[in-house]
Image (cartoon, rainbow, N blue to C red):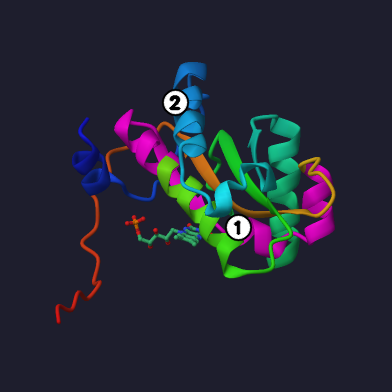
Amino acid sequence: METLEAIKKRVSTRKFLKKQIKEKDLKIILEAGKQAPVAYNKYSDLLITVVQNKELLNEIDRLCDEYYGADTMVFFNAPTLIFVSSKNAKYDQEYENVACIMENMALAATDINVGNVYLKGMTLHIEEKTLSNLLNLPEDFRAIAALGVGYADGELKPKVHDLKIERL
Ligand SMILES: Cc1cc2nc3c(=O)[nH]c(=O)nc-3n(C[C@H](O)[C@H](O)[C@H](O)COP(=O)(O)O)c2cc1C
């Protein structure tokens, strides 16, 4: 797929097949994440954590349900969650770094027909220390977002976004 085609086709997937993604697909997505631009070249302040372990996924799901007091399906049963964490996430810049990595991975996933969804909720609803421990994050790192990936159950049409563009 051409880059512009992948950009046009990207859409949030919220219904996944149970089947795990192929290792070669995961590698392509992770490599794209690594290619993202990062302020001051500080790649060592960032960490990508792939979660495929069922017990861990269930625990993340349980903690989110606990927060909401309901069965929330917060990551839509995506078989893989790719968390992106940053050290000392205090300034906008750290969040922007994470967003660049996330979008690169989302576009790469789209390119190879792997469904994906940008997930912020989990990192807000699970207590920071609890999530850091679950993800085995180094000291001072914090999970900022996760990309849920898996093969989509059904075909999705990209949306038309109401984003204004002004020209001066
Ligand atoms: C920073 C950020 C946080 C998001 N968090 C969530 C989330 O927690 N759960 C979710 O289902 N979608 C989440 N999304 C996806 C947006 O809802 C989605 O991109 C938007 O509605 C546009 O739809 P589209 O991605 O299908 O084009 C997030 C997107 C971004 C960029």
Q: Which picture quadrant has residue 50?
A: top right
Number of numbered labels in the structure image: 2
Q: Is residue 25 above or below residue 7?
A: above
* Depth order, front residue of 120/142: 142
Magenta-colored stretch includes residue 108 = yes
Report x, y in % for residue 72: 60, 57
Q: Main secondary structure of the magenta part?
A: helix
Please state, as top left, top right, bottom left or bottom right, where the N terminus lies in the image.
Answer: top left
Alpha carbons under labels 2 and 1: distance apart: 30 Å
Specify the quarter for ligand 1: bottom left
Looking at marks 2 and 1 on the same chain, the residue that comes earlier in the sequence is marked by 2
Report x, y in % for residue 12: 38, 50
Q: Amino acid at mark 2?
A: Ile
**Residue depicted at 52% across the width and 36% down the height:** 34
Q: Is residue 106 above or below residue 71?
A: above
Report whether 45 appears left or right of 166: right
Q: Which residues are magenta?
A: 105-134
Farthest residue toward the bottom? 168
Which residue carries the number 2 mark?
Answer: 28
Which residue carries the number 1 mark?
Answer: 72
Q: Amino acid at mark 1?
A: Thr
